[in-house]
Amino acid sequence: MNQISVGILEDELPQAEMLQRWLAEEGYKAFHSTTGEDFVRQVAQQSPDILVLDWQLPDCEGINILSRVRDQLNFTGPVIFATAKDSEDDIVAALKLGADDYLVKPLRKNELSARLDSIWRRAGGKKTQQLTLGPIEIAIDQHRVYVNGEEVNLTATEFRLAVCVLQNEGNLLSREFLLKEVWGVGADLDTRTVDMHMSRVRRLLKIGPEMGYCIKTIYRHGYRLEKL
């Protein structure tokens, strides 16, 4: 079973990256675009399950993108608008044209997650508790990891680190971020602890050229899981 995938259309890059990070932390697989044209191409290529759309963009309006993905791409999944436009007329227009929900900025992580869970349930879906990357399968709810069908024994810390990395494919993860997410807020640990555990996760999950992915070390910054 694959992760629920979410396509994000947001023209402000820091906001888009924040939303993608929030969703990854909640177990979703997400991609983002800052322009309407690129977003339509990505939706056609990646077939996401849910869309989160901004309204006002440099090259178009989100309401037009909604019409295009519904009419041209036959996208039938749930759509949430996340925008600063808060008039009743705008909300009604979006809902009439096929949006399933409407959030007014500034967004809040817990509310966004709750709305996504709600519209996915209404659409008949069920949130997955499994991550898959090539031959790697992680059953999050059971705390089990498999590589090529064989179970791999990870410590609790290694397991949390592996989940964090797989949920953030393509994202730069600083050592400070990983200390906070994996070891806990304000973890008073040397960043070499992260390096040691990352090395073990790489080796135990056999992440490397043969499986088509790598965990790249970004000098002075951290790590990024990349497809080769």
Image (cartoon, grey):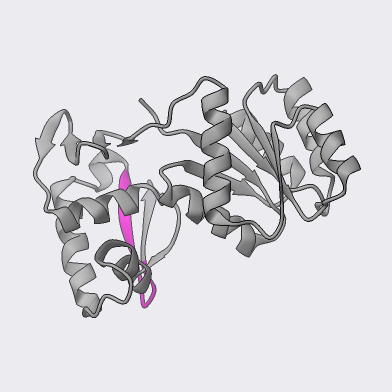
Q: Residue at x 33, y 35 (%)?
A: 129
Q: Can the viewer see residue 48?
A: no
Left or right: residue 168 versus residue 188 is right
Residue 45 point in image, percent of width and height: 59, 31
Query: Which quadrant of the view contains residue 73?
Result: top right
Name the residue at 58% across, 47% down: 112
Q: Nearer the viewer, residue 92 or 167?
A: 92
Which sits in the foreground, 45 or 88? 88
What secondary structure characterizes most of the magenta part? strand
Is residue 9 at least partly visible in the picture?
Answer: yes
The image quadrant that residue 143 belongs to is top left
| Place of residue 3 in the rendered image (x, y in percent of width and height, measured from the top left) | 41, 34
Q: Is residue 44 above or below residue 32?
A: above
Per the rendered image, the range of residues in magenta is: 213-222
- Return the residue found at the far right: 89
In the rendered image, residue 216 lying in the magenta stretch gets the answer: yes
**Residue 94 located left or right of residue 100:** right
Q: Position of residue 32 (x, y in %)?
A: 60, 48
Q: Is residue 220 magenta?
A: yes
> Looking at the image, is 183 positioned above or below residue 100?
below
In the picture as drawn, the residue positioned furthest to the left comes out as: 153
| Residue drawn 31% across the image and 41% down it | 212
Residue 154 in the image: state x and y as whole percent.
12, 49
Q: Is residue 70 left or right of residue 227?
A: right
Q: Quadrant of the N terminus?
A: top left
Query: Left or right: where does residue 97 sit relative to residue 178?
Result: right
Q: Residue at x 18, y 36 (%)?
A: 147
